[in-house]
Amino acid sequence: MTASPPYHKAKRPRENDWRLFLKLVPYARRNQKIFLASMVLLVPISIAKAVQPLIIGQAISLIRDEPTWGFLADRSLSGGINILLGILSLTIIVRLMFASLQGYLVQQVGQEITAGIREDLFSHVTSLAVRFFDRTPVGRLVTRLTSDVEALGDVFATGAIGIVSDLVYILAIAITIFGLQWQLASMLILMLVPVTGLIIYFQYQYRKANYKAREELSQLNSLLAENVAGIEIVQLFGREAVNAERYRRVNRRYLKAVDRTIWYDSAVSATLEWIALVAIACVLWFGGIFVLGDALSFGVLSSFILYAQRLFDPLRQFAEKFTMIQAGFTAVERIDELMSEPVEIRDREGLELKSLNNNRSDVSLKIQTGEIRFEQVSFAYKNDEYVLQDLNFTVRPGEKVALVGPTGAGKSSIIRLLCRLYEPTKGRILVDGIDIRDLPQGELRRHIGTILQESFLFAGDVKRNITLGENYPFEEIERSAKLTNIDKFIESLPQGYDTQLRERGTNLSGGQKQLLAFARVAIRDPKILVLDEATANLDVATEAEIQEALERLLEGRTAIVIAHRLSTIRNVDRILVLKRGKLVETGSHEELLAENGLYAGLYRLQMLGN
Ligand SMILES: Nc1ncnc2c1ncn2[C@@H]1O[C@H](COP(=O)(O)OP(=O)(O)OP(=O)(O)O)[C@@H](O)[C@H]1O
């Protein structure tokens, strides 16, 4: 495998920060009150911080007998200093108390936003069509759902969101210094302009580097996921060293990308550090000239020096939080890409609501008999490469039909279309006379019981693997196990129905997993049964054993069966023979043998093999 391509080849233009920020607004709105409280608290905090240099400046003016605020003028030195100390203490108390409360509230909102996004992302991903998963490596998805969402969470957890308070603080300082002396104030504010420009430049570069780093990380995770999922093949074919080398190469690329992000991060901190020093030097220089020319008091100059330092302080803080925030923006960008992935197969408007509320009063939308009809159905996985062409057939209620044909003829694709995992490129599929696009997906799939060649088991106990988390009484679970002849097997397990199965059912044999899949379908009592090579993994003895159970399961239901072993489908009512996506023969076993066409040829070949 070459390195997997990104799942959307045509990249969307990079979103600007403001638009990305707006994406978070609906989430913040869910916690509106806390969010507003945390924003309101910023005002007293910033005012308290901004007036401190003023108070110190007044104290110095008082000591040096310079003009001071009116209410200090007619007091003794110690009286005036005491009042100033009192106000200073008050600002410190306000700052300390409100700052911790504000930090707590912001984090709370932040974590709520992150949790909301995580949940929405999961729901969105699991409702995307199978077509999306065909082109998206698992590792990429896992990276977006875990480390990207985490990166966003970190923005809040590490207090990087405090950047908002830094901005309010800068504003408060700007207003105060203009009130003190406009020339020095203008100089300081003018210095902010190139600094901001530089920050924006580095920010942009950092974002690009960070995006690249996240992409490389996704690839790294894809490789890991692929190797773990296919560990048996990796070991059996001795691919360990080769795959490790490929992993090392991607890892090196990741490292290089991360290095670049570190470089831009350091560049911002360093730039701000020396610009802050230059600002203080300038204030001292020009302020000194004003003081010498008696245009400025020594106390006000002291305030300005403190302000110069404090003005760049939030910017320095900004630089520290900058990495986090940019990583957060990258994360939002990547999360948004996934969220914007359209849900290709969705219920028609109005249907969703009905299925959610379990409102089954609309009789026209209920599957009652299980008749299946394909009308002029053609289908291509990729543009114009048709794997099914002009299919027309009807499976009557209760009829058992087998799909037969050489490998790649399109048998499984027919089933995927019926279950609406994909949609036909042309034509339509009807169940009980209703176009399946007009049925809620929940209703359609509830009535189609599908058993594939390999059934997927989840980590959890046997019971849960049969119910899949739905509420069925234990008696029903037992009944479905009995119906499918696997009750004895389950009871022979160490803890019976409570036996824990490992992820993907690795502690069961292929046949045992399959038996559980039968019970999983039986308990749902579907109108339509679909078996895609369902017994291919069972040995002949087990197959014979469950044949009886299978027949019981098939009773009274419409069924579509795919089996390569033609001996297993001799008893079906009708056989549809496919060749390269086209229906070439139809009839019963005997009729098709008499016809002496493709089916008869395949059948004779298999008989010869036996
Ligand atoms: N997800 C997919 N993306 C693109 N092409 C696909 C996909 N799945 C199947 N195909 C192609 O569609 C054609 C029909 O595949 P399908 O699985 O329906 O055949 P089948 O008759 O069930 O084969 P088999 O008997 O081997 O299971 C094949 O040529 C296959 O390469």
Image (cartoon, rainbow, N blue to C red):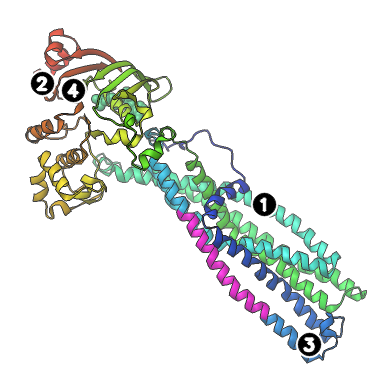
Nearer to us: label 4 or label 1: 4
Residue 58 found in image quarter:
bottom right
Identify which residue is drawn at 92% across, 76% down: 294
- The span picked out in magenta is 90-115
- Residue at image position (82%, 89%) is 75
Q: Residues within 10 Å of mark 3 (few under 14, many from 20)?
A: some
The residue identified by callout 4 is 399
Quarter residue 556 falls in:
top left
* Helix, strand or loop under label 3: helix
Q: Nearer the viewer, mark 4 or mark 2?
A: 4
Q: What residue type is disc 3 on?
A: Gly
Q: Using the image as rendered, state which of residue 296 and residue 171 is in the foreground.
A: 171
Question: Residue under circle 1?
Answer: 200
Can the viewer see residue 250? no
Compared with residue 61, is residue 504 higher up or lower down, i.e. above or below?
Answer: above
Tag 3 residue: 80
Mark 2 and mark 3 lie on one chain; the one further toward the N terminus is: 3
- Tell whether label 1 touches label 4 (CB within 8 Å): no
Q: CA distance from mark 1 to mark 2?
A: 73 Å
Amino acid type, residue under disc 1 in the picture: Ile
Numbered disc 2: secondary structure: helix
Packing grade of label 1 (10 A; few <14, some 14-19, many >=20) is few
